[in-house]
Image (tube, grey):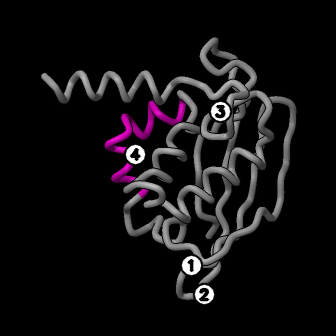
């Protein structure tokens, strides 16, 4: 029973927006590049200031459509920690390479160098939300590694 209550509380927290209070959650004030930068920075330092804190930060910017695919935070956590995403969690450095925005859709390409110095490119697809909870906020619909 406690786990169900905890899961419900996490779901409420995850869907709330920062709405200008700070950069810890979605806000209409953040651009697509800023949203992706917050996510990649969080993943780079995923265990600071607490275990998985950076992964939680990235999850807060996952759109409702993204969450329908990835599921609740626990499943999102397992997906992010999968070997295919190792470069994001163990990056030495990263940079935004390209931003393309058309109306309420955006793509941000990020180049990541992992702890072994191997570079990879990742495309973040974002959309501007229309729902009441995060109206006007850019949120991530998906992330793919460019092959």
For the residues marked 1 and 2, what is the alpha-carbon distance in whole angstroms?
A: 5 Å
Expressed as whole percent of the image width and height from the top left, the position of residue 40 reads: 62, 58
Query: Mark 2 vs mark 3: which is more N-terminal?
Result: 3
Query: Mark 3 vs mark 4: which is more N-terminal?
Result: 3
Q: Is residue 77 magenta?
A: yes
Residue bearing mark 1? 114
Q: Start and end of the magenta stretch?
A: 65-80
Q: Badges 1 and 2: C-beta atoms under 8 Å apart?
A: yes
Mark 1 secondary-structure assignment:
strand
Residue extending furthest toward the left: 1
Q: Is residue 119 magenta?
A: no
Label disc, if present, on residue 76 of the rendered structure:
4
Residue 42's quadrant in the figure?
A: bottom right
Query: Mark 2 vs mark 4: which is more N-terminal?
Result: 4
Query: Mark 4 vs mark 1: which is more N-terminal?
Result: 4
Query: Mark 1 vs mark 3: which is more N-terminal?
Result: 3
Mark 3 secondary-structure assignment:
loop
Label disc, if present, on residue 117 of the rendered structure:
2
Side (left or right) of 59 relative to 146: left
For the residues marked 4 and 1, what is the alpha-carbon distance in whole angstroms?
A: 21 Å
Q: Quadrant of the C terminus?
A: bottom right
Residue bearing mark 3? 26
Side (left or right) of 1 relative to 93: left
Side (left or right) of 142 relative to 82: right
Expressed as whole percent of the image width and height from the top left, the position of residue 25 reads: 61, 35
Expressed as whole percent of the image width and height from the top left, the position of residue 103 reads: 86, 30
Q: Badges 2 and 4: C-beta atoms under 8 Å apart?
A: no
């Amino acid at each position: 029973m406690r786990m169900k209550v905890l899961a419900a509380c996490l779901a409420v927290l995850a869907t709330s927006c920062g709405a200008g209070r700070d950069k810890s959650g979605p806000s209409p004030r953040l651009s697509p590049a800023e949203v992706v930068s917050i996510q990649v920075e969080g993943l780079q330092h995923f265990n600071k200031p607490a275990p998985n804190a950076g992964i939680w930060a990235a999850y807060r910017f996952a759109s409702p459509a993204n969450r329908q695919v990835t599921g609740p935070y626990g499943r999102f956590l397992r997906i992010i920690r999968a070997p295919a995403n190792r470069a994001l969690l163990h990056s030495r450095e990263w940079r935004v390479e390209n931003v393309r925005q058309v109306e309420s859709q955006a793509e941000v390409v990020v180049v990541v160098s992992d702890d072994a110095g191997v570079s990879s490119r990742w495309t973040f697809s974002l959309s501007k939300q229309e729902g009441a909870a995060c109206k006007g906020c850019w949120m991530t619909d998906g992330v793919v590694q460019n092959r």
